[in-house]
Amino acid sequence: SGIEARRIASGFYSNLIDVGWYDQPLGSFVAQAAGLKLFGDSVGGLRTTSAVMGALTLPLVYLLARRMFGARVALVTIGLMAVAHWFIAYMRLGINYNQSTLLGVFALWTFWEGMKKPCEGSETFARLTRVGWFALSGVAIGLGMYLYFASRLFPILIIIGFGFALWTRRNEARALIGGALVWGLSAALVFAPMGLYF
């Protein structure tokens, strides 16, 4: 991971729509390349980048858990996650895996926000807000395809959750399907360059 990050930072690659070490998309090493410039071109800089990615994941997990289950469960969730062995291990390894977690949790949270009941205010504002959440989630899913392979699981999780929501909230089917179409289009547009590569 560090070697690929150094290559990206030095301009070795003329195009990031490609694969690098272990056939992982080159995009998965961009954050680490930036981290090497910010935190130092060393193993410490690489590990700091992973730690920052992991630390940024925790507030997103809190927001997702709070929206789904309430504040108490959200606090317990991030408390347990912050001390979980695998989470800590990937935060300190200096490898690109935990970027998928960060972007995936963001995609889940924003999709869930889009599926919630419309916010207070005018009907037009509520629709725009809902569409915006779905679009953000789609962009995150599309960007996730440029990261580590685990990111490919998040669209599946969202589609399963969407199917359940559609089943339980049939009276809102039209709005939910519209949001899902925005989500899919956003993801497809962002992923298109890498999709054409593959």
Image: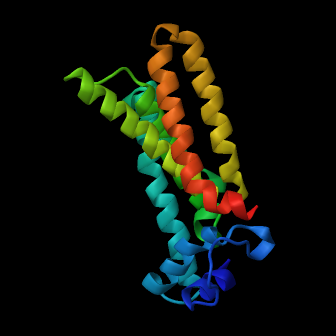
Task: Identify the residue at horizontal 52%, vertical 23% (top origin).
Answer: 177
Task: Identify the residue at horizontal 66%, vertical 62% (top origin).
Answer: 194
Front-lying residue, 65 or 129: 129
Residue 150, given in percent of the width and then of the height, sits at 70, 52
Task: Identify the residue at horizontal 47%, vertical 86% (top origin).
Answer: 37
Residue 19, given in percent of the width and then of the height, sits at 73, 72
Front-lying residue, 82 or 152: 152
In the depicted structure, whether residue 64 falls above or below residue 44 = above
Front-lying residue, 3 or 50: 3
Is residue 79 shown to the viewer in this render? Answer: no
Question: Dividing the image into 4 quarters, which one contains the N terminus?
Answer: bottom right
Task: Identify the residue at horizontal 28%, vertical 26% (top origin).
Answer: 126
Question: Dividing the image into 4 quarters, which one contains the C terminus?
Answer: bottom right
Which corner quadrant of the image does residue 129 belong to?
A: top left
Which corner quadrant of the image does residue 163 belong to?
A: top right
In the depicted structure, whether residue 109 falls above or below residue 194 = above
Residue 8, given in percent of the width and then of the height, sits at 59, 84
In the depicted structure, whether residue 54 falls above or below residue 62 = below
Task: Say left or right for 168 vs 18.
Answer: left
Is residue 50 shown to the viewer in this render? Answer: yes
Q: Residue furthest front?
A: 196
Residue 108, given in percent of the width and then of the height, sits at 52, 39
